[in-house]
Amino acid sequence: EDQVTQSPEALRLQEGESSSLNCSYTVSGLRGLFWYRQDPGKGPEFLFTLYSAGEEKEKERLKATLTKKESFLHITAPKPEDSATYLCAVGRQGAQKLVFGQGTRLTINP
Amino acid sequence: GAVVSQHPSWVICKSGTSVKIECRSLDFQATTMFWYRQFPKQSLMLMATSNEGSKATYEQGVEKDKFLINHASLTLSTLTVTSAHPEDSSFYICSALGQVRYSNQPQHFGDGTRLSIL
């Protein structure tokens, strides 16, 4: 069974304090690993797709990396507006649906 | 970017009534749409997958007679919660995929519907 585990559940940082969020996964044939950001009361907003181990993608202060067992979302010099829940999901080859992790609630204090 | 609109964003109704939620892809044709349910501070739980023109595929434990899904066009899917009860209160979110199945394109999500049953 496909599984996604995210850690930590919650993370509080000071503005400018860089850190990383972890997403560990098991899947039978990875189609893609997806990172989303979700603000309270809103639907998830797509950030990145990673397809194979060693791949990296960047967007502003965020960089996502992928190995065969986990993905990291690195946040460099975060700002308060980066506060949100970050969700990781995997898609299996030949399947349309995604399996989501529980998310990491990130709070950036000014 | 791909835009998915969900309506209504918030609904309150009495126990026993039926509620319909619409999910529209505004700038692309969605062959596949997904319906999720999310409880406070929890992740998304997939309820069903709907492909345009065919019956929805429900996840284990989801009552298909309770949660009716219709995907009659390439831009619209609806979820009807029939005879809703307080335990059906939740945040319902839809997502959509474009025309290339099993590709690596991401699902694009609507902004959700907060359903409260009194």
Image (cartoon, rainbow, N blue to C red):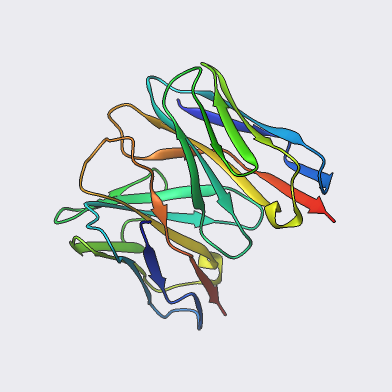
Q: Is residue B62 visible?
A: no
B94 horizontally vs A18: left or right: left
> Quick check: B45 above or below B110?
above
Q: Is residue A54 above or below residue A75?
A: above
Left or right, residue B96 beside residue B10: left
Q: Give the quarter of the figure containing the C terminus of chain B.
A: bottom right
Residue pictured at 50% horizontal, 72% vertical = B85
Residue A35 x, y percent position in the rendering: 52, 40
Name the one closer to the observer, A66 or B24: A66
Q: What residue is shown at x 76% (from left), y 56% (from top)?
A: A80
Left or right of residue B69: residue A84:
right
Q: Residue at x 71, y 32 (%)?
A: A20
Residue A48 seen from this side: yes
Q: Nearer the viewer, residue A67 or A95?
A: A67
Q: Horizontal and vertical percent for residue B117?
A: 54, 76
Residue B71, image quadrant: bottom left
Count up the numbered dots: 0
* Quadrant showing the N terminus of chain B: bottom left
From the top left corner, tell me how far across and down residue A75 is, in percent.
69, 38
In the rendering, at what x and y percent does residue A36 appear? 53, 46
Q: Residue at x 49, y 23 (%)?
A: A55
Q: Nearer the viewer, residue B96 or A74?
A: A74
